[in-house]
Amino acid sequence: AQTVTQSQPEMSVQEAETVTLSCTYDTSESDYYLFWYKQPPSRQMILVIRQEAYKQQNATENRFSVNFQKAAKSFSLKISDSQLGDAAMYFCAYRSAGRGGSEKLVFGKGTKLTVNP
Amino acid sequence: DAGITQSPRHKVTETGTPVTLRCHQTENHRYMYWYRQDPGHGLRLIHYSYGVKDTDKGEVSDGYSVSRSKTEDFLLTLESATSSQTSVYFCAISESNRNYGYTFGSGTRLTVV
């Protein structure tokens, strides 16, 4: 079974600075998808960014980018120019690319990000 | 997200009572999931559905049952609630485009006293 590990339970960053959240995963599959979700205090789960394992190019969404290292099974999230609204719990998630379509998302335990003004 | 709603948003119940949480979607997605979120555990899958009347267990299914009689509704039932089932419950939906992840409901905070 796949596992996702987020080794940083909590992180903090100064406003306007850059922070990187770590995620590693364990799988024997070669084709899969990786995601970062943001959960602000409102509790809503918001998709931040996704990465297809077959793509070598790292995904970018505005101030959010990933460093995807397939061989190392690492998928870190970089937040540039941090804003107060970035304060949230961040979850890394893995999804198999199997043919069935029902492949489940497997989540890490989360990293709580605090942004200091 | 407007395409998926959970009810109730909050609930307090007593130990031993049955509880049903409802997830309703308007996206006509095939796949629906129930997760629970607990501090230090992230989100863990309880049950999921891959079609009407087609359901299967996740990693923490003990004490829970589900039903899906219509595409749009996925019900999670705690037959006899226990304090260990105090949690935040999320419903999620997905289509076959697996690279798009899930769309989540707003969650239900359930407290069992």
Image: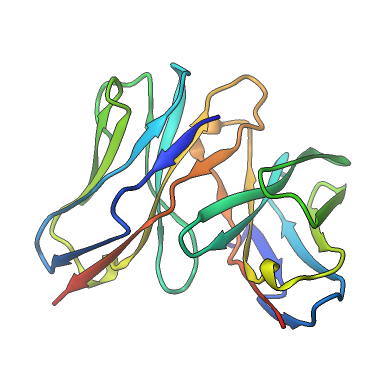
Looking at the rendered image, the quarter that the C terminus of chain A falls into is: bottom left
Image: A22 above or below A16: above
Residue B92 x %, y %: 63, 52
Q: Residue visible at 45% across and 25% down? A: A27
Residue A35 x %, y %: 41, 41
Residue A111 x %, y %: 34, 57
Residue B51 occupies quadrant: top right
Q: Residue visible at 25% across and 25% down? A: A57
Image: A13 above or below A98: below
Relative horizontal placement of residue B91, taking residue A91 as reference (left or right)? right
* Residue A60 in sight here: no
Image: B89 above or below B110: above
Looking at the rendered image, the quarter that the N terminus of chain A falls into is: top right
Marker count (numbered): 0
Residue A88 x %, y %: 34, 66
Relative horizontal placement of residue B109, taking residue A112 as reference (left or right)? right
* Residue B92 in sight here: yes
Image: A59 above or below B93: above
Q: Residue visible at 54% across and 54% down? A: B43
Q: Residue visible at 53% across and 24% down? A: A97
Residue A67 occupies quadrant: top left
**Colour scheme used in the picture?**
rainbow
Front residue of this view, candidates A80 and B89: B89
